[in-house]
Amino acid sequence: MRITTYKRDLVEDGYRVIGVDYGSDHRWDWDMSTDCRCISIQMSLTGTADGQSHDDGWKSLISLADSDMFLDNEYARREHADFRINYAEIMRGSHPDWYLSAFKVFVGGITLFFVNPKTDDSGFLWIVGAKCLKLAFKVPYTRLGFDTIYNVHIEHDGEEHLFTMVEEDLGYIRYENEIKLKEPGKKDDNFFHDGNQYLVVTEYVGL
């Protein structure tokens, strides 16, 4: 087995995963995060903070969820009513009309993108500051026929961010990715740290 460690800059949208439908005849070089042609990504909660039950873990994550769609204005209430009302059920994967189409991981948090093919609606939210966030994402399938598994693990100690890790399991190769800030004290850094992140990657080949 070959093991290689290297660094890689993250630019623009950073670390993003979409449910690509390889049977489609369109290009995938533009923002497909909330396109209803994306296939469904399966999300599951794989760990909680110490002492929390699985259900309490979900409640904790749902309580941290936020979005521009939750703004208290007439446009958001009118245009995003279904997502605003049902986002907790949608997050749990228990709403029959909505599914997860993409996700983005950044230092300290994650953004989730959802679509509703019946209405052509879409929604998104982010989770920041979770004491312990452990989520697994199953993305079917690669061109080689493998389901890809992404395990996301984010830890905080109080207000201090400890680490953000993403493990990719492609079946024949595995990556351990730690997302870090290039400039931790950057004054004009935005909420998602766009353009201020890099990966430390450990690659395992020949499993």
Image (tube, rainbow, N blue to C red):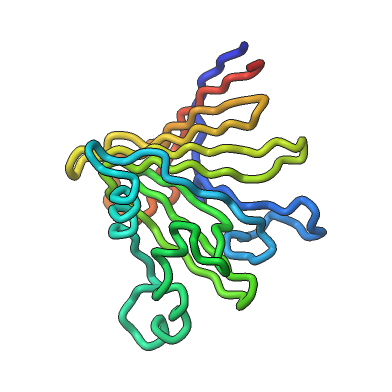
The quadrant of the image that shows the C terminus is top right
Number of residue marks: 0
Image spot of residue 85 (x, y percent): 40, 75
Comparing 106 with 84, the one in front is 84
Q: Which residue reaches farthest top?
A: 1
The residue drawn where x is 35% and y is 43% is 133
Residue 185, quarter of the rendered image: top left
Image spot of residue 195 (x, y percent): 44, 48
Residue 37, quarter of the rendered image: bottom right
Image-based side of 88 in relation to 97, left or right: left
Image-based side of 114 in relation to 180, left or right: right
Q: Is residue 160 above or below residue 91?
A: above
Q: Which residue reaches farthest left?
A: 158
Image spot of residue 174 (x, y percent): 58, 26
Image spot of residue 154 (x, y percent): 35, 39
Comparing 75 with 100, the one in front is 100
Q: Is residue 120 above or below residue 102?
A: below
The quadrant of the image that shows the N terminus is top right
Image-based side of 139 in relation to 82, left or right: right
The residue drawn where x is 36% and y is 48% is 109
The residue drawn where x is 63% and y is 65% is 35
Q: Is residue 131 above or below residue 99?
A: above
Comparing 47 with 158, the one in front is 47
The residue drawn where x is 39% and y is 64% is 88
